[in-house]
Image: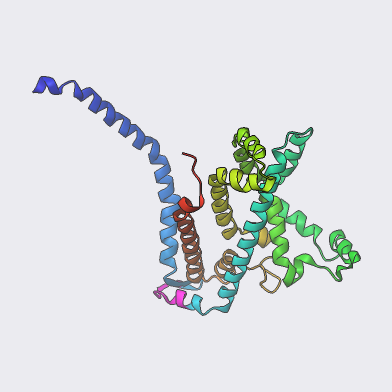
Amino acid sequence: MTRAARPGRPALRRAQREALMGVLFAAPFALGMLLVVIVPLLGVMGISLTQWSLLDAPRWVGLRNYTRLAADPAFLRSAGVTAAFTAGILALNISAALALATLLNVRLRGIGVFRTIVFSPVVMPVVAWALVWKFLLQPDSLLNTWLSRLGAGEVNLLFTPSTALWTVVVIEVIKSVGLNAVIFLSALQGVPPELHEAARLDGATGWQVFRRIILPLISPTFFLVFIVTLIGALKLFTPVYVLTGGGPADSTTTLIVYMFKQGFQFFEFGYASAVATVLFVIVLALTVAQWSLRRRLVFYEG
């Protein structure tokens, strides 16, 4: 019995060593997630149940901050701004990225230069990008003056409540569309050319080829880009704050800008933490909902 069991011991020890090595390699990442993500997240949730400002010590108030949020018109307005801002980013970014990727997928002379131009805004510092656009969109700037001379009337894109939000959306799309275009380009280049040829031989139009063949094959990439762009739009802060500061008349005050104002301008840390917790729950719920629908919406070739 003992002799028969001996040959299995080295294999068992090797499996144990491999398991230990796996744990050691994963430990730094797990420790980083614990210290940088999970512990601060739990801390914010705990602070959201208190009333805490710089003037006094934290005081337990339970769910009072959340009931205050439900009746706060400024919070509800910022939630609506966030929804419109996110929808605009998703629609413009993904459609423009897919169109650019289709153009970049064509083999023409100088296409490498065009690819570089499309991607170059992605690597620019966010603050520098926002400051340049803020300078270009000053009330007496060349762009506003040019639009006024075209018959648009008195134009002030960045400082008019009806146009400020969509101006920020366009600026952000120009900044980030290159990354999604490159991701879509890699997916398009993975579509077998034989499928294009077979579809054309069957008499399919360009739109039919795109809808029935290309789009299903790149749907996993489309799904990834959609989730990443959605989460990025919901947590976007720097360009909005630099360009408008949440104004004019709170027309660009998204939830994360509202959270920043409550925490670092009015020093209502408990209330700001409640806003952060609500934003986290929204992002988590949207991500889980999309992930649960992936089998219906995404075509996996295997």
Residue for point 69% across, 51% down: 96
Q: Which residue is at the front of the view, 83 or 161?
A: 83
In the rendered structure, the answer to whether residue 284 lies left or right of residue 234 reads left
Q: Quadrant of residue 162?
A: bottom right
Q: Position of residue 225 (x, y in %)?
A: 57, 49
Q: Quadrant of residue 168?
A: bottom right
Q: Is residue 97 visible?
A: yes
Classify 6 as above or below 204. Answer: above
Picture residue at 40% right of the left edge, 50% below the top: 34
- Decide if residue 124 is in sight here: no
Q: Is residue 196 left or right of residue 11?
A: right
Q: Residue furthest left?
A: 1
Query: Nearest the camera: 13 or 34?
Result: 13
Q: Measured from the top left, where is residue 131 in percent x and y?
A: 74, 56
Image height check: is 3 above or below 131? above
| Residue segment shown in magenta | 57-67
